[in-house]
Amino acid sequence: MLHFITVALAQPISMTPEQYILLYEKHLSGSCTAEEEELLMQYHDNFKMQDADGSKLPDADKKLRSTIYSRILNTIADRRPKVIKMHWWWAAAAIILLVGLGSLFIKNQPPQLLVKNVKSSAIMPGKNAAVLTLANGANIVLDNAANGVLAKTGNTAIKKLKNGLLAYAANENGSHPDTSALNMITIPKGGQYTIMLPDGTNVWLNSESSLTFPVAFKGSTRKVSLKGEAYFEVAKNKAMPFIVHTDNTDIKVLGTHFNVHAYKDDNTIKTTLLEGSVRLSSTTSSTVLTPGEQGTTDASNGRITQKKVNINQVMAWKAGYFIFRDDDIHDIMKQISRWYDVEVVYEGYTTNMKFGGTYAKSKDINELLKGLEYTGLVHFRIEGRRIIVMA
């Protein structure tokens, strides 16, 4: 489903369909002000799902649908293959609009936009899944484990709570914590998981990621190691800075909220700050981020660059969405591959066109692939758990 447009108007509003379209285009391009983003969300809140064919909708709502659909088709028909302009964003937005609005638009789509028949009943969206590796080498499959105490190390109990959260809690038995014992939580493809560390720090881990940490923090720092992607809400402790170590960057904080994207196949480490401050350090450079900034470390030379970014796009994975803005198909398919646990193969696809749109990660993979095909720029074939990308 579209994050912003989920069809029919529920009550009168002041914004016209044309104004909404223009504002939505601006949102996709990343140029909305905070006030405009708020207006867009308020407008979205006036929508609700109605019958798929739209036969029971008020005339004003039918007109809104018709206007949006006509604008989408006109924009797609007007695209120029060698120039990536704003209309590409709107053409890409049609991916989600048509998927989100359902059969009303699909029945009326022109023949050249019909999607190939793909069968992928075995490919399901990701879910909570993780494996916890204890200091003694024992593995606990968390998605199969019952709630309650899973293991004990010194005076630290490892618990699985009712909401699926993994938590480390100190027992009051007088024993000393084993600060040398390291645990590792590993998230497979098609998985995600949340853990509360011994100091109270909460960590949300994305697909194909792992976090290594001590069962108890002691000393001058709290240090963990990350591979993949995670969002941290660090418990404040001025006496013990929290350090996230990746292959190329150390992120040092006292207590703050930030996201780290450190997949090896991306060749960069991206740290995005939501609140507070963080210091990034590599082998060759160092910098301090302010809220709304992203620091990118080049894996080849350690050089760190920083810029303002759209926080909603960075944090979409945690919120349950894909948000694509000026992304090429390779970057998009990396995310799809990790979340749906599929192999991606390219067959005669050599273009570098850009795509944009918003899509709920809980939906069937067919809907997302069909949506991408609506642009007319890419096609797919599914063979088992392999997705073939074609021009």
Image (spheres, helix red, strand yellow):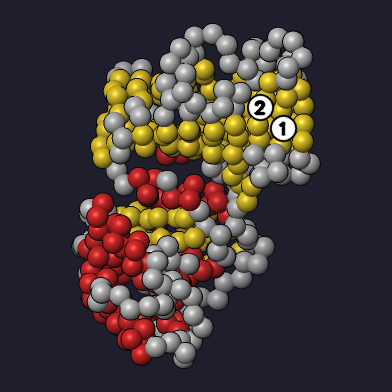
Mark 2, secondary structure of its residue? strand
Determine the CA span between mark 1 and mark 2.
6 Å
Task: Quadrant for residue 305, please give it.
Answer: top left
The image position of residue 50, as x and y in percent, is 49, 80
For disc 2, the marked residue is 168
The residue under the point 49% across, 9% down is: 220
Residue pictured at 37% horizontal, 49% vertical: 312
Give the image location of residue 52, x and y in percent: 50, 82
Image location of residue 261, percent across then percent down: 44, 37
**Left or right for 226, reference 94:** right
Q: Is residue 243 left or right of residue 299?
A: right
Residue plotted at (22% across, 63% down): 86
**Does residue 11 appear to the left or right of 151 in the view shown?**
left
Q: Write down the residue under mark 1.
A: 159
Q: CB of mark 1 within 8 Å of CB of mark 2?
A: yes
Q: Residues within 10 Å of mark 1 (few under 14, many from 20)?
A: many
Q: Amino acid at mark 1?
A: Lys
User: Identity of the amino acid at label 2?
Assistant: Tyr
**Is 245 placed above or below 12 here?**
above
| x then y, percent, for residue 53 | 48, 87
Foreground of the two, 253 or 297? 253
